[in-house]
Amino acid sequence: MIVGVFGGSFNPPHEGHRLVAETAVRRLGLTRIWWVVTPGNPLKDHGALRPLDERIDLVHQFASPAKSTVTAFEARYKVRFTADTLALVKRRRPDMRIVWVMGADSMASFHRWQEWRWIADNVPIAVVDRPGMTFPALASPFARRYAFARVAQERASILPYRQAPAWTFLFGPRNEASSTRLRNAVAGTS
């Protein structure tokens, strides 16, 4: 089984998230994609964070049911950081091939994540392009440090079989949707 682990606060989920997930499934040949709805992102303000149960319900509405699993196991296992989440998955499911999936907006700030080097050294990473984030992502400390481990997007389907560090950047259709913009629209700000 080849699983893409796609984590986020999904506050709220939107078409851009769905496009990232669907692109990863299609281009990497994933068996499943797990939408891991986090209790909260340590790098983001929690002031406007919707309740976890509400965000899980919203993700269920967005996730393509054929290959998606929506989970909040970070809350159940009291896991706070992505590195701990991935270590837990690897420990509990050693037979499963996993790929960390993220949008280019996350890659641009990936070097600020707790244990980001551990993630890169232990789990293959698929990055899906997002509007306005191509250059910031590809110029990021992560991209520079791990340039030697980049897999060409034309060969992305081999990524799940590569020993980390290994990553790919997937260009393609992009969706302008943004959780921040959606929250601001609801709040009446811009």
Image (tube, rainbow, N blue to C red):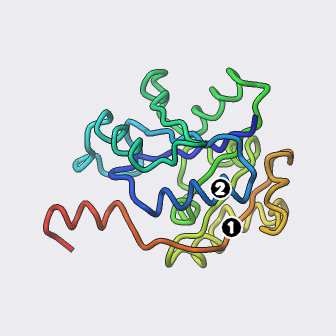
- Which of discs 2 and 1 lies nearer the camera? The answer is 2
Q: Position of residue 15 (x, y in %)?
A: 43, 62
Give x and y (percent) for residue 166. Answer: 80, 54
Q: Residue furthest left?
A: 188
Task: Tell me the quarter of the image containing the N terminus.
Answer: top right
The amino acid type of the residue labelled 2 equals Ala
SS class, disc 2: helix
**From the viewer's perspective, is residue 172 above or below residue 80?**
below
Residue at left offset 86%, top offset 48%: 162
Numbered mark located on residue 46 in the image: none
The residue positioned 60% from the left and 79% from the top of the image is 135
Residue at label 2?
Answer: 24
CA separation, marks 2 and 1? 8 Å
The residue closer to the viewer here, 130 or 149, is 130
Q: Position of residue 186 (x, y in %)?
A: 18, 62
Q: Position of residue 75 (x, y in %)?
A: 42, 27
Which residue ends up furthest to the front in the rendered image?
Answer: 66
Dot 1: element: strand
Query: In the visual, does 68 lie left or right of 183?
Result: right
Q: Three-letter amino acid code at disc 1?
A: Leu
Asked if the residues shown at circle 2 and circle 1 are in contact, with their CB atoms under 8 angstroms apart, the answer is: yes
Determine which residue is flagged by label 1: 170
Residue occupying image coordinates x 65% and y 28%: 89
